[in-house]
Image: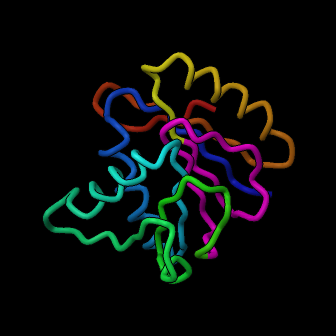
Amino acid sequence: MADVLFYHLEARPLEAVLPQLLEKTLERGWRAVVEVGSTERAEALDAHLWTWREDSFLAHGLAGDEMDRHQPVLITTGTDNPNGAVVRFFVDRAVPQSAEGYERIVYMFSGHDPDAVAEARLAWKALREGNALTYWQQEPDGRWVKKA
């Protein structure tokens, strides 16, 4: 049984939230793979993670070379798991279909995009059997509140 966490982004954008969650993932000794919806967004996210904070270094790589298996965090548009991650993040309209093979799934979607919210509802229904689901929503100040 995997833990599946739904993060409903409203007050703060993905670029502000994802790096913090990735840091917490690495602090626990876990590897992560981040699935995004397009190559362009993968490249933009890769660039952002290198510079997101001056006092931090978030080791990661963009999928597609021989070093993939060594990356603690790997950004991809594919569905494979080349770095042996135990946590998979789904962002930027990438939608989880299954939690198989992972200890944790983190699904982040924009509350400002009605299509993304509809996709999240469908994903909730598809993943609730056999997994432990939680739903987190942002408060106006950016704090997370567990709603389900």
Spot the residue most to the right.
Answer: 129
Q: Give the image quarter of residue 26.
A: bottom left
Indicate whether residue 138 is drawn in magenta: no
Looking at the image, which residue is at 30% across and 45% down?
Answer: 16
Indicate the position of residue 121 as horizontal and vertical percent values.
68, 25
Indicate the position of residue 136 as horizontal and vertical percent values.
53, 36
Indicate the position of residue 47 as horizontal and vertical percent values.
28, 58
Spot the residue most to the left.
Answer: 54
The total number of labels drawn is 0
The colour scheme of the drawn protein is rainbow
10 or 82, nearer to the observer: 82
Looking at the image, which residue is at 86% across and 48% down?
Answer: 130
Q: Give the image quarter of residue 103.
A: bottom right
Does residue 25 sit above or below 134 in this rendering?
below
Q: Give the image quarter of residue 97.
A: top right
Looking at the image, which residue is at 58% across and 75% down?
Answer: 83
93 or 147, nearer to the observer: 93
148 or 31, nearer to the observer: 31
Quarter of the figure with the N terminus? bottom right
Does residue 111 sit above or below 31 in this rendering?
above
Which region shows up in magenta? Answer: 84-107
